[in-house]
Image: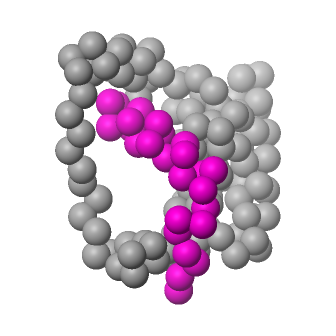
């Protein structure tokens, strides 16, 4: 029972953070990264796969997803809307890198895609000028 209340308290903290983000004028990509990216608030509050799984089941997580979904959609720097890009890329890596990524994803309790997305998103947080605020 102690573990559950700890998750609930941290979920409330995450929701409060998300509500503050909403007032900053960020688009949904920037807000998502601030919450769920490698250095994001939820990533820090729920560091283990078990804690993240418990958080995802909370009402606060559902509310956070609703808040993010209502934020403005970004415009990609080349003038295309985010709806005009496919969301798919193909990256060829050495087998050793692939094996290391698979091992890390399993250890973290996430899919290989989720791990790679987190790793690719980290530099984007440091360079928000690459994504312009859009309606």
* Visible residue check, residue 5: yes
Res. 7 image quadrant? top right
Q: Residue at x 58, y 71 (%)?
A: 27
Q: Main secondary structure of the magenta part?
A: helix
> What is the total number of numbered labels drawn onto the structure image?
0
Colouring style: one colour
Q: Position of residue 99 (x, y in %)?
A: 28, 15
Q: Position of residue 21 (x, y in %)?
A: 73, 64
Residue 7 is inside the magenta segment:
no
**Taking 59 as reference, is 43 above or below it?**
above
**Nearest the eye: 84 or 5:** 84
Q: Residue at x 63, y 50 (%)?
A: 126
**Taking 74 as reference, is 52 above or below it?**
above
Left or right? Give the position of 79 relative to 20.
left
Q: Position of residue 4 (x, y in %)?
A: 69, 29
* Visible residue check, residue 33: no
Res. 68 image quadrant? bottom right
Q: Residue at x 54, y 46 (%)?
A: 123
Q: Position of residue 40 (x, y in %)?
A: 65, 43
**In the orientation shown, which residue stands out farthest toward the bottom?**
135
Left or right? Give the position of 11 relative to 38.
right
Residue 122 is inside the magenta segment:
yes
Q: Residue at x 79, y 47 (%)?
A: 13
**Nearest the eye: 8 or 128:** 128
Image quadrant containing the N terminus: top right
| Numbered range of the magenta stretch | 111-135
**Nearest the eye: 1 or 84:** 84
**Taking 28 as reference, is 117 above or below it?**
above
């Amino acid at each position: 029972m102690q573990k559950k209340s700890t998750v609930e308290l941290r979920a409330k903290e995450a929701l409060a953070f998300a509500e503050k983000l909403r007032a900053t004028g960020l688009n949904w990509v920037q807000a998502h990264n601030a919450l769920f990216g490698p250095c994001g608030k939820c990533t820090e509050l729920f560091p283990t796969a078990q804690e993240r799984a418990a958080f995802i089941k909370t009402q606060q997580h559902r509310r956070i997803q609703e808040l993010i979904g209502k934020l403005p959609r970004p415009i990609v720097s080349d003038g295309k809307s985010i709806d005009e890009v496919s969301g798919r890329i193909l990256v060829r890596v050495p087998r050793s890198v692939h094996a290391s990524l698979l091992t890390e994803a399993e250890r973290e309790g996430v899919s290989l895609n989720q791990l790679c997305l987190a790793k690719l998103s980290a530099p984007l947080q440091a360079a928000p000028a690459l994504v312009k605020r859009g309606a």
